[in-house]
Amino acid sequence: MMRAELRDCVRVRDVTQQHRGSRPAEAMDKVDGMDSGDAAGTEPGTPAALAGAHTEELKDVAVRKAEIAVGRSESPVVTEETTFLNESAADAVRQPAEPSKGCTRFCACPPAGLLASSVTKVTMALLLFGVVWSITGSQCLPGGNLFGILVLLICAVVGGKLVGLIKIPTLPPLPPLLGMLLAGFLLRNIPVITDAIRIDFHWSASLRNIALAIILTRAGLGLDPKALRKLKAVCLRLAIGPCTAEACAIAVLSHFMLNLPWIWGFILGFVLAAVSPAVVVPSMLLLQKEGYGVEQGVPTLLMAAGSFDDILAITGFTTCVGMAFATGSTLYNVFRGIMEVAGGTIAGVALGFFLRFFPSKEQEDLVMRRSFLLLGFSIFAVFGSHVAGFPGSGGLCTLVLAFLAGVGWADSKGSVANVVGRAWDVFQPLLFGLIGAEISVSSLNPSTVGLGVAVLCTALVLRVLVTFLMVMFAGFNFKEKLFVSLAWVPKATVQAAIGSVALDMARTKQDPELERYGMDVLTVAFLAILITAPIGALVIGLAGPRLLQRPKTELRENGEAGISRGEGPAQPSNSNESTI
């Protein structure tokens, strides 16, 4: 009986030792040995019997130790194995029933996905408002200046997001800048809202000038000397010919149809002559990703020539603006314009070489320091030129210094461009929202709108024809020439950046006639963005797969893959369905 109890106690100890990672086999062997010894029939009183009594005492000690081990096993975990077992058991107890996927999506704890993103964005917006209100007080309340800027910024961002969500099958996406532009336009022309949202024109002009400096900086950094050397004459012809022809045509048409002075006609011409990189570049990247026109270099040509086109238009615009607001004879104004171009170029060269060597490469946070100095010099050049009385030199100075600095920063030019792009992400909604907010339906002249659209359409037709002629001897076939001509139509970014500059300068002069001219320029620029940006994006997205060729190797691989699956050969790239 005692042996049976002893065996049971040892088994309990074995279970405990298994949890504690010990070896129970030896204890069982001892008990089995005791059983075999007793079974041999040892007589009492002999030495063997005495040894057996001593063995019985050892058994009692072993039983007590086994009971102590059982008691200790009920204490907190002391080994890795028991830790894992206990934690697994505890997790099984604590783990609740798995909720449904729909509930997890919106009611997860902690929140995640769409709910967490929405709460974060709303909190950021409210926090921004609260911080500004705690500092400025009434300026951040309805009717205040900062309140109008904050509401405009938020509405412009939301408008851009909503337009970006519009996706039509087989059609390219619409540019988000349309939503930003329309958001500002609606805020200005809804009766109840327009009374609560008021932005001082000094603040509006300053914010637009900062956005202009950022655009010019990006244009300067975007110039690629290697692409210019590779494309050579074709790139220059495509950048200079259409821009100059359209600017001259608009100057003549606006002089006779809109009754603008010649210098103001050229201001309007150079405002409208620039092509929009915000529309052309994303559309070209989509086509390049699909392989359309890559072998012929069509996307590279358009993206490289677009930067030079914008620089030419901005340079012509700043020169004409300086001449328009100068006082003196015509000869003096022409000489002044030439001096502004020369002065801006010299200042840009000096600052550009300075930024190539300072900060030096061994300094910490090199990219951030270069970005700060580049943006600081650019904004200072734009504002400082107005203070110095040479408004036409600031933009050219910014372009030159950004280009020279980028050439010297071959190792970190891309990183600096990314930082400048972040700044543009903030000021882009402000720029387009402020441009839209400048247009009031009640103050628009129907004849100005109608004649402005007529001038714009006529100039666009001429631009398409001149562009076709400029690429006549570039080695393209007829379809590729037609695509390049149609892709050179969209207008948006440059028009928003410089379209209101003349109006802002006219307001500082407090001349009603100059303000009327400036408002006509801004109105036609607004119409140009509203009409050509979506049409240009759609034309590029639809015409690209039909007019451009894909690489022959890719077409051959697609055809072989289709035949191996039992399908017909791959269709040519000019099919009726767009792949974008």
Image (cartoon, rainbow, N blue to C red):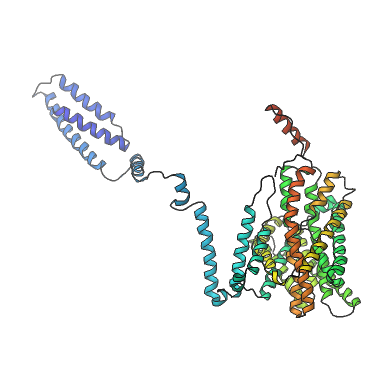
Q: Which percent across, then down, holds residue 283?
A: 73, 50
> Would residue 328 appear left or right of 387 to someone viewing this image?
right
Note whether 212 is above or below 460 in the view shown: below
Residue 141, placed above or below residue 1: below
Residue that appears at 68% across and 53% down: 174
Picture coordinates of residue 332, whole percent (x, y) = 89, 77
Q: Nearer the viewer, residue 350 or 116?
A: 116
Q: Nearer the viewer, residue 10 or 162?
A: 162
Foreground: 75 or 211?
211
Q: Residue 405: in sight, yes or no?
A: no
The part of the image, by quadrant, that contains residue 367 is bottom right
Q: Residue furthest right?
A: 331
Task: Pick the quarter of the image with the C terminus.
Answer: top right
Quadrant for residue 395, please give it. Answer: bottom right
- Residue drawn at (63%, 61%) of the image: 365
x then y, percent, for residue 410: 74, 55
Residue 530, position as x, y percentages in the image: 72, 60
Q: Is residue 450 visible?
A: yes
The answer to whether 567 is drawn above or below residue 362 in the figure is above
Residue at the limit of the structure toward the left, as seen here? 45
Q: In the rendered image, which quarter is residue 348 located in?
A: bottom right
292 vs 201, nearest the viewer: 201
Quadrant (top left, top right, bottom left, bottom right) of the N terminus? top left
Q: Residue at x 79, y 64 (%)?
A: 450
